Image (tube, helix red, strand yellow):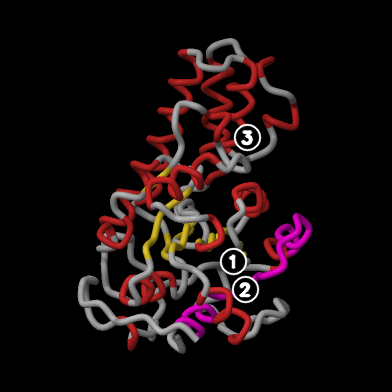
Amino acid sequence: MVRRPLGNHHDGPDTLLVTPDTTQTEPVAANTGNETADDAGNATGNGKGTGTGNGTADLRELITRARVVLWDFDGPICRLFAGHSAEGVADGLVEWLEGRGLHGLLTESERESLDPHVVLRAVDRRHPGSDLVTELEERLTQEELKATATAMPTAWADPLIRTLVALNLRLAITTNNSPQVATTYLAGRGLTSCFAPHIYGRTQELRHLKPDPHCLNRALRAMGSAPDTALMIGDTPSDFLAAREAGVPFLGYARNERKEKLLRGAGATAVVDSLESLLNAVRQL
């Protein structure tokens, strides 16, 4: 089994001993080291991998091969829209388009998707590279920035991130959210140094949003990492598909049964319902 030396370059206390003793209900600016609920009614991840079929030994084997860990942002690291609903943001984008006489630009299913990325992609498909797309993307970025103030850190994410850094793994963000948004959130949690400068998010080239592997490939190239020496942690089918296309091993995080079904339906086989499971495995390296 590969053992890695502990480093002293991480922020805060020795995170190998950190556990989330209380439920965090403050905005992200409060950097307490404790983790928050990652779903209503699930105050802390139970760490037992219920229904996932992935024990500590399996997770330990998965992480042992990794030298680089690519994180999706919204989901595995935090619930970005916990206090600023994504549905409301999507409705706002639709209303903005309708106010400009562009009601017919979206299909009924796109208008009712309640997903701002669906709206953005739809407009880009019909008017790629246009000023309309640029303005719509900027409006979404501003809404995402507002959401960081009430984003809810995912249970066990902070100590897992710090522990991986202490074990000399390199981390990157690979997200469909704005990189500015991820940077703002990480700064509020004191986690910037764990990822910077490797934060790869949405660009003006919207065709490169996941499931396209573009942001993963950018991270791998910048970090000089072969795909099979990386691991991606994501919570959506598009994360899994992007990782598969890039040749990167994948670990799914499913905070509820619906998320797990979607991941498994896309083909993901390694899925956990709590990051505590992975943290326990990492602590045994």
Around disc 2, counting alpha carbons within 10 Å, would you say few (fewer than 14), some (14 to 19), or many (20 or more)?
many
Taking the spot 50% from the left edge, 44% from the top edge, the residue there is 217
Where in the figure is residue 277, as x and y percent of width and height? Answer: 55, 81
Residue 227: tell me if it is visible.
yes
Q: Which quadrant holds residue 115?
A: top right
Region of the chain picked out in magenta, as a range: 261-282
The residue under label 2 is which amino acid type? Val
- Spatial CA distance of label 1 from label 2 is 5 Å
Where in the figure is residue 126, as x and y percent of width and height? Answer: 64, 16
The residue under label 3 is which amino acid type? Val
Along the polypeptide, which appears first: circle 3 or circle 1? 3
Q: Which quadrant holds residue 25?
A: bottom left
Question: Looking at the magenta stretch, what is its main secondary structure?
Answer: helix
* Front residue of this view, candidates 213 and 255: 213
Tell me whether circle 3 and circle 1 mark residues in contact (CB < 8 Å).
no
- Spatial CA distance of label 3 from label 1 is 22 Å
Mark number displayed over residue 272: 2
In the rendered structure, the answer to whether residue 169 lies left or right of residue 249 reads left
In the rendered view, tell whether residue 134 sits above or below residue 49.
above
Which mark's residue is nearer the viewer, 3 or 1?
A: 1
In this figure, which residue is indicated by the disc labeled 1?
A: 253
Was residue 268 drawn as part of the magenta stretch in this picture?
Answer: yes
* Front residue of this view, candidates 100 and 126: 126
Taking the spot 50% from the left edge, 13% from the top edge, the residue there is 130
Which mark's residue is nearer the viewer, 2 or 3?
A: 2
Taking the spot 43% from the left edge, 62% from the top edge, the residue there is 152
